[in-house]
Image: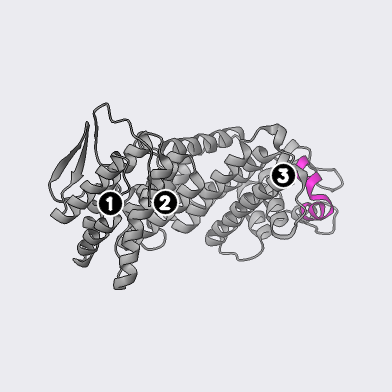
Amino acid sequence: MAQTGPINASQASPIRMGRSVGRQIPGNSLRILQIDSHSFELHSISDAIDSAFDAIYRDILQNRSADWDLFTRAASDFLDSDPSPAEMDQFFEAAEPISFFLAEYRKIDAACDYWLDILGVITNRERQLSRQYHKGSGYFFWACSWFSRGDTDTGLLIMNKALIEDKRQQCCSNGNWPNSSAAMVVTLDQSLNLLHPASWWVGEQVQEIDDALDSANLNLRTSDIRSRLFLGSDTDLISLLIYSHSSILRIERLNLDHHDSKLLGSLALNHLFRITVIIENLLKARTGSHGSFMQQIQELSCQIGGQLKGQMPSQNGLQYASCINDQRKANASLLLRQLIDGTARYRDVGQTNVSNLDQPLCVAYVLRNIGAHDLDVPVIIAEEIHSLRVHVLATLVKCVEIYYP
């Protein structure tokens, strides 16, 4: 059960409830819980639940072990009444202010443990009664505690669980996103309240993606990708894309002096590879072709004015894409370095340069194949994480420009 150290309660601090959904919840009257110099604004749910929350809040503030048995009995009675999703949202919103308080005092581990206890009470009762209650708000607030801790990996995994709960409750089909705060986080909605525990992370992701697109001389912004791709695509696919990008960025931000690790390169490649697989699936969904990734890349190249689908002069009908593939087989590391440096050439009579249009597509293709087949990761993966991320994002944006208007 969650434990905390001493809390300085010498200054008055009114704490208002957070919101877990993108709508105002009609409900019971609000009440003010006053403990020492602190006041908390809470939903009034029932006498038993209100008293149970009061006891938990007091125990935490006064550095006592919380009486979770009392809380479990009150919560079980509440759950036996088969509360609606809106009532469950109110229940979790009443639980939230003390976790926010703990986070404010940098007791983040205690806040995370607290939500594990709260959700444990609900899931245990679900198993006992063979029922399912709406827990989206609970997972959302738990994820917020992890974001406050700076652990975005765990925060995103739990936020995805909140998203799944919200989709189920709002009966969202594939490609339809629920109206919820969890959906705003996962889709990088910049209208998220600046006080939101995940707003710093959303802002960071948007800035990094926009900077990458600027360096690739592309006009689309993250907001365009969000409206044209994210909001009309499967939530699981977009969640994986955002998780992978966040993970690459975290690895990339290590000091460059420490980028010569094979393990680091392998981890970065795993996430880059996953994004190329997502791009492959996005292309297949719109091109109607279910061939190889190279065939998908060739078609995209053709659409943007590139050469990969064309035939090389005086090479007996050999396509430019085949030449890239041959170079990949011969020395993938060298090919990646030349693509990044802008010195990659086709082995035709004129030694034609790989165009700026095709460079990111070729990088995505090479990473897709290395990630799928090679255990010995080229050193360049660790050395050039930033450039590789930019090229992969550029390929994604070209896909969005052509096939997701």
Tag 1 residue: 92
Q: Nearer the viewer, mark 1 or mark 3?
A: 1
Describe the element under mark 2 as helix, strand or loop.
helix
Q: Are marks 2 and 1 in contact (CB under 8 Å)?
A: no
Q: Tell which circle, 2 or 3, labels the residue nearer the N-terminal end.
A: 2
Q: Is residue 310 left or right of residue 158?
A: right
Instruction: Residue at 63% x, 42% y: name it.
Output: 389
Residue 16 figure quarter: top left
Where residue 266 sits in the image (x, y, percent)?
69, 50
Please tell me whether mark 1 sits on a helix, a strand or a loop: helix
Please state which of residues 193 and 285 is positioned toward the viewer in this rendering.
193
Part of the protein shown in magenta: 324-338
Q: Residues under labels 1 and 3: Cα distance?
A: 44 Å
Given the image, on which type of amino acid does mark 2 rest? Met
Residues tagged 2 and 3 counted as in contact (Cβ below 8 A): no
Q: Residues within 10 Å of mark 1 (few under 14, many from 20)?
A: many
Which amino acid, by three-letter code, is at mark 1? Phe
Residue 221 visible in the current orientation: no
Residue 350 visible in the snapshot: yes
